[in-house]
């Protein structure tokens, strides 16, 4: 009974492997959160770029900066309320302040998404107005997301706040992520494809042979294995070959032992014949 279970188990393994491969290929993505972003100017190509970032949604990503006495915490969320502030995609909180009031750097209802093969630049406009700088325009956040296969989402880094000019000021951030990396053509090398095909053929051979031996020939026990006698023979021949190649003692032995050592050799063919008999 134990032996007859083995081909079934092999078939089960092949089946689960196949299912896994199919699932990997399709790459199921269930959520739809980037839809919450409203584009500054609706466009299909920008939607497509934005949807590449779907795995990064629903996460508060924080960064901290220290500059002398000033210390700020930034919270970024993709198409969701950053730090729970409604409508804000990126906020700044004064860490030193006792009653921290978040400043909105950018809103996700004014999003722009520009992308290349291994990067995406995300722009949130419509932040809170500057108090004195930049002609008191609305703040704007630019988040540069670059491909890094080593991490799904690296730390958010604050690069600079460019506000010493008349207009078009911005806060610049950087984020490493594997989700913007180009899709690899095939995860399988030729070697592993050959291996999988060989594995499947072996399974077909084992299962088919097993069924044939059991149902057509009516074999029982170990003989249900396809070509059982042949494989036993192969095993014995391999063992003989190994014995011949690897064992050094026979050749170096003094002549008087030769008679003794040849005896087992003569025995072996008989042993092999024993296995052939049931055929
Ligand atoms: C995502 O949203 C679009 C439109 O809102 C809808 O047609 C689509 O079925 C949604 N997809 C999923 C996976 O929820
Ligand atoms: C983000 O942070 C806010 C405030 O801390 C919290 O209310 C919200 O649930 C967080 N969102 C996620 C997705 O972690
Ligand atoms: C985005 O939302 C803010 C407040 O939540 C609003 O003042 C602003 O007009 C909105 N912007 C756009 C482009 O809809």
Image (spheres, grey):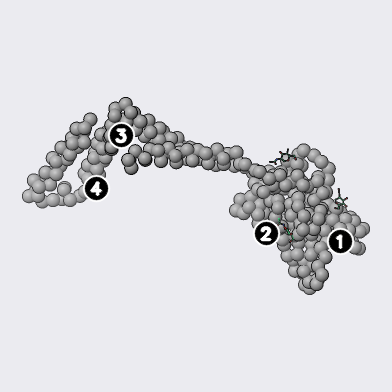
Left or right placement of residue 198 versus residue 231 in this view: right
The percent coordinates of residue 6 (x first, y second) are: 37, 40
C-alpha distance separating marks 1 and 3: 84 Å
C-alpha distance separating marks 2 and 3: 59 Å
Q: Who comes first in sequence, dot 4 or dot 3?
A: 3
Left or right placement of residue 32 versus residue 271 in this view: right
Q: Which mark is residue 211?
A: none
The percent coordinates of residue 233 (x first, y second) are: 24, 36
Front tag of 4 and 2: 2
Residue assigned mark 1: 164
Residue assigned mark 3: 224
Left or right placement of residue 41 versus residue 251 in this view: right
Left or right placement of residue 12 versus residue 180 in this view: left
Viewer-proximal residue among 55 and 258: 55
Q: Residue at x 88, y 55 (%)?
A: 138
Extreme residue in the front direction: 1
Give the class, few, some or many, for how many residues have Cα within 10 Å of label 3's Cα (few <14, many ≥20): many
Front tag of 4 and 3: 3
Q: Residue at x 33, y 28 (%)?
A: 215
Residue assigned mark 2: 155
C-alpha distance separating marks 2 and 1: 27 Å
Q: Are marks 1 and 3 in contact (CB under 8 Å)?
A: no
The percent coordinates of residue 173 (x first, y second) are: 75, 57
Give the class, few, some or many, for how many residues have Cα within 10 Å of label 2's Cα (few <14, many ≥20): few
Q: Residue at x 83, y 43 (%)?
A: 41
Q: Is residue 97 above or below residue 149?
A: below
* The image quarter in which residue 234 lies: top left
């Amino acid at each position: 009974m134990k032996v007859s279970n083995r081909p079934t188990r092999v078939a089960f393994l092949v089946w689960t492997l196949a299912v896994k491969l199919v699932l990997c290929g399709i790459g199921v993505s269930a959520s739809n959160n980037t839809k919450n972003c409203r584009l500054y100017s609706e466009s299909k190509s920008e939607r497509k770029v934005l949807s590449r970032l779907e795995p990064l949604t629903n996460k508060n990503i924080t960064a901290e900066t220290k500059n002398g006495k000033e210390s700020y915490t930034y919270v970024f969320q993709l198409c969701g309320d950053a730090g729970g502030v409604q409508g804000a995609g990126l906020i700044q909180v004064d860490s030193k302040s006792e009653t921290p009031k978040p400043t909105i750097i950018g809103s996700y209802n004014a999003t722009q998404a520009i992308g290349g093969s291994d990067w995406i630049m995300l722009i949130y406009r419509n932040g809170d107005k500057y108090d004195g700088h930049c002609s008191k325009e609305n703040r704007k956040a630019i988040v540069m997301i670059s491909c890094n296969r080593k991490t799904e989402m690296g730390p958010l880094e604050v690069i600079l706040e460019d506000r010493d000019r008349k207009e078009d000021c911005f806060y610049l951030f950087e984020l490493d992520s594997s989700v913007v990396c180009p899709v690899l053509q095939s995860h399988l090398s030729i070697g592993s494809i050959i291996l999988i095909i060989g594995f499947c053929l072996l399974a077909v051979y084992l299962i088919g042979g097993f069924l044939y031996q059991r149902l057509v020939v009516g074999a029982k026990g170990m003989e249900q294995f396809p070509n059982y006698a042949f494989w036993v023979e192969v095993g014995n021949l391999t063992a003989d070959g190994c014995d011949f190649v690897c064992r050094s003692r026979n050749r170096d032995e003094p002549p008087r032992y030769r008679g003794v050592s040849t005896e087992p050799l003569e025995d072996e063919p008989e042993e092999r014949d024993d296995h052939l008999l049931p055929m």
